Image (cartoon, rainbow, N blue to C red):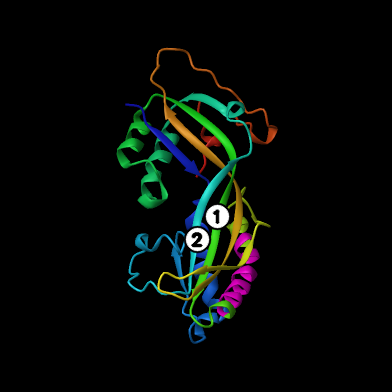
Amino acid sequence: MSAILIQYQIHPENTVLHLLRDFFPMTGITERKGFETRIIQGHPLFSESVNQNNNNAEFPAIGVEHTSDVRIDSVAQNFMRFRNSQRIREFFQKEKLKPIEERIATDSMLDKLTTAPILNKFLFSVKSIVSIAGYCSGITAKNQNHLIYNTVDGLMLPICHTIMYRHRGVKAMVSPNTQTNIEMDHITGGKIWGFESSIELHQTKAVYQTNKNTKRRYTYYPATNSSQIYKTKDNDLTNGLIG
């Protein structure tokens, strides 16, 4: 069976989630009575079950969720086939160090890629949409939600700046698509007030695939975009690796 590795430059959801968890308490809002806000993985209205140590389902809560990838360029322009090498094998083994929730490939799939003589690679650009949604309930929910929204909105630029500073080649920007004062009925009665914003991460996404036909002579196909042309030496395409 063939093996495939799908890789981002940075994990969209966890990158934003960790930064928001770091920055949010720095604003002092969590020191206010009733503003002990939980920052969780996924949408706060639908993803309570995926968060550990979360027996209290009360609001306020902010959820961070990677919702979609928008393809920016053509896959066909960035296809290449090359021989495996020691540096690439080390690259695949290094992927095992990532938490399992941040990668699709299992250890056994990475081992198959490591031992494969010939590899295919598809390289393309995506715009990863990461949603940040906050919801509050109770008598003061509307005012509480407004204050939390203003806090999160003020943190969007520091989060984007930090991502671009730490991860070379990744562009982060605040999406103009923001919804505020979202109102809905609570299951136990009363109202829920919320907001939904998002951050766009422009980054490179790579797909590595084992090639079954090892007898046919392989060909290197360079990218048509001059900024994505990779140099080769002894059929070693390690300059094109992401990591």
Residue pointed to by mark 1: 130
Mark 2 surroundings within 10 Å by alpha-carbon count, few (fewer than 14), some (14 through 19), many (20 or more)? many
Q: Is residue 181 above or below residue 86?
A: below
Determine whether the residue tagged by mark 2 lies in a helix, strand or loop.
Answer: strand
Magenta-colored stretch includes residue 16: no
Q: Is residue 146 above or below residue 82?
A: below
- In the picture, measured across the screen, residue 8 lies left or right of residue 78, that is left
Region in magenta: 144-160
Toward the viewer: 212 or 242?
212
Q: Find residue 35 and report its horizontal and vertical position in percent.
A: 50, 81
From mark 1 to mark 2, how far is it between C-alphas? 7 Å
Q: Looking at the image, is mark 1 or mark 2 earlier in the sequence?
A: 2
Picture residue at 33% right of the left edge, 41% below the top: 106
Picture residue at 63% right of the left edge, 73% below the top: 150
Residue pointed to by mark 2: 64
From this viewpoint, is residue 233 visible?
no
Principal secondary structure, stretch drawn in magenta:
helix
